[in-house]
Image (cartoon, rainbow, N blue to C red):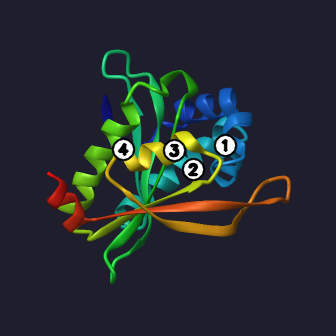
């Protein structure tokens, strides 16, 4: 898998994935989906993500198939707190790419980037309690469940849902090697 930061021109591949999977992604990523109603807006969002990298606010990566360069998904370190040295991982994959270990591989590489390049001490993942696949992925990547936040996230239809929190510290990561 090829993992690289977003760059100018990536709006088209981002838009096409959102367009194809808008219904599936809208509940978990309503803000991201709302950033790509059309190609022009998607490209502006990608340019914003690229700028956020240089501002050290969000480190967003495009996941690409190594042989075809097909866009497979998104993985980011966001909500960074430089004083406390922690950040949140957020991710999604195209439906056809799920279940192949691709996001697990990508998270492993980005965790290494977080420790080695960003010098973070802690990463966390938040997943809807009903998203078993994402919760399993967090555990498979070495994150530990830290609790459940009740009615933490407002869904597009106005209902609230609980969010499970998973964390991984540098010390836990190094101890598990």
In three-dimensional space, the C-alpha distance between marks 3 and 2, rounded to whole angstroms, equals: 24 Å
Badge 1 or badge 2: first in the primary sequence: 1
Tell me residue 132's x, y (percent): 57, 43
The residue singled out by tag 2 in the image is 45
Residue 36's disc number: 1
Q: Is disc 1 in contact with disc 2, using a CB cutoff of under 8 Å?
A: yes
Q: Residue 83: where, in percent of width, then height?
A: 33, 83
CA–CA distance between discs 3 and 1? Answer: 23 Å
Of 66 and 48, nearer the camera is 66
Q: Residue at x 44, y 22 (%)?
A: 70
Spatial distance from mark 4 to mark 1, Cα to Cα? 31 Å
Secondary structure found at label 4: helix
Determine which residue is flagged by label 3. 134
Select label 4 or label 1 by which is in front.
4
| Mark 3 secondary-structure assignment | helix
For the residue labelled by badge 1, is the local secondary structure a helix, a strand or a loop?
loop
Residue located beneath label 4 in the image:
140
Give the crowd class for mark 1: few <14, some 14-19, many >=20 residues within 10 Å. Answer: many
- Residue 117 can be seen, yes or no: no
Residue found 59% across the figure and 30% down from its top? 17
Task: Look at the numbered discs 2 and 4 and tell me whether their residues touch, using CB distance below 8 Å.
Answer: no
Relative to 175, residue 83 above or below:
below
In what element is the residue under mark 2? helix
154 in relation to 60, above or below: below
Compared across the picture, whether 27 is left or right of 16 comes to right
Where residue 171 sits: x, y (%)? 20, 67
Q: Dot 2: within a 10 Å radius of its alpha carbon, few (fewer than 14), some, or many (20 or more) residues?
A: many
Task: Quote the CA–CA distance across marks 4 and 3.
Answer: 10 Å
Q: In terms of sequence position, does the residue under pointer 4 or pointer 3 come before the other?
A: 3
């Amino acid at each position: 898998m090829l993992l690289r930061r977003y760059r100018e021109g990536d709006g088209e591949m981002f838009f096409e994935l959102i367009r194809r999977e808008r219904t599936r992604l809208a509940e978990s990523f309503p803000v991201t989906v709302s950033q790509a109603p059309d190609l022009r807006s998607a490209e502006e969002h990608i340019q914003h993500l690229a700028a956020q990298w240089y501002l050290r606010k969000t480190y967003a990566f495009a996941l690409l198939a190594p042989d075809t360069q097909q866009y497979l998904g998104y993985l980011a370190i966001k909500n960074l707190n430089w004083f406390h040295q922690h950040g949140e991982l957020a991710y999604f994959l195209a439906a056809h790419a799920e279940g192949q270990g691709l996001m697990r591989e990508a998270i492993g590489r980005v965790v290494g980037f977080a420790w080695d390049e960003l010098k973070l001490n802690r990463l966390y993942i938040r997943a809807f309690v009903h998203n078993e696949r994402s919760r399993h992925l967090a555990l498979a990547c070495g994150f530990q469940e830290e609790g459940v936040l009740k009615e933490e996230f407002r869904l597009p239809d106005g209902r609230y849902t609980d969010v499970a929190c998973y964390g991984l510290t540098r010390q836990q990561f190094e101890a598990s090697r």
